[in-house]
Image: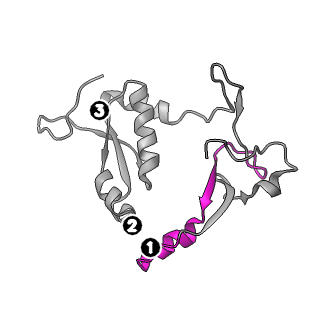
Amino acid sequence: MAKVNPDSDEGHALVLIETYRDLPEALLAKGSLESAGIESFLADDNTVRMDLLWSNLLGGVKLLVAPEDEEDAREILNQAIPESLELEGAENYLQPRCPKCGSLDVNFQELYKPIAFASLLINFPLPVHREGWFCQTCSHSWTETESASNELTPEKPSFL
């Protein structure tokens, strides 16, 4: 792994691996690469951190790596979501699945994002809450009461 300074003018070119609309996603991807020993850099992260609405204008937060690390970085970021997590001294955790399509690409949402983001446009944030799951693959959303009869969907994670 080569040490690259993104601010130097020594001819080191960085390769764009991925762009992310949201800073937390970019930070997770950067952390995944760093845990594998691949040095990476985020571009436009400070601007997006200051004002989320600038993200689309800038093309999102950009994840950059050295050219020699590009293949390994893409391989790490394209790994499939594991169906279960095995932790020492703890019971295996089964990943939640979408009851509609069976995808593992789901997340628990407490904030109703459409209203919350729209309220930012009028400079009056309205944190409207609703608890439920959202599938990133098929855009299906459901609550725990709706999924009680579906054994594929676990209850709200204990860490939330």
Label whose residue precedes the other's in the sequence (1 or 2): 2
122 or 90, nearer to the observer: 90
Find residue 53 and name its label: 2
- Mark nearest the camera among 1 and 2 is 1
Can residue 44 be seen in the rendering of this structure? no
- Mark nearest the camera among 1 and 3 is 1
Tell me the residue at 63%/19% (across/down): 88
What is the residue that sits farthest to the left in this orientation? 9
Amino acid found under the numbered disc labelled 1? Leu
Q: Residues within 10 Å of mark 2 (few under 14, many from 20)?
A: some
Figure check: 137 above or below 1: below
Q: Under tag 2, what secondary structure?
A: loop
Tell me the residue at 47%/47% (across/down): 25
What is the residue that sits farthest to the top in this orientation? 88
Instruction: Specify whether residue 24 is painted magenta.
Output: no
Q: Under tag 3, what secondary structure?
A: loop
Q: Is residue 74 left or right of residue 7?
A: right
Q: Position of residue 38 (x, y in %)?
A: 36, 27
Distance from the alpha carbon under mark 1 to that under mark 2: 9 Å
The boundaries of the magenta stretch are 98-126
Q: Which residue is mark 3?
A: 66
Figure check: 131 above or below 77: below
Decide: marks 1, 2 in contact (CB < 8 A)? yes
Q: Is residue 5 left or right of residue 138?
A: left
Find residue 120 and name its label: 1
Residue 90 image-quadrant placement: top right
Q: Is residue 116 left or right of residue 51?
A: right
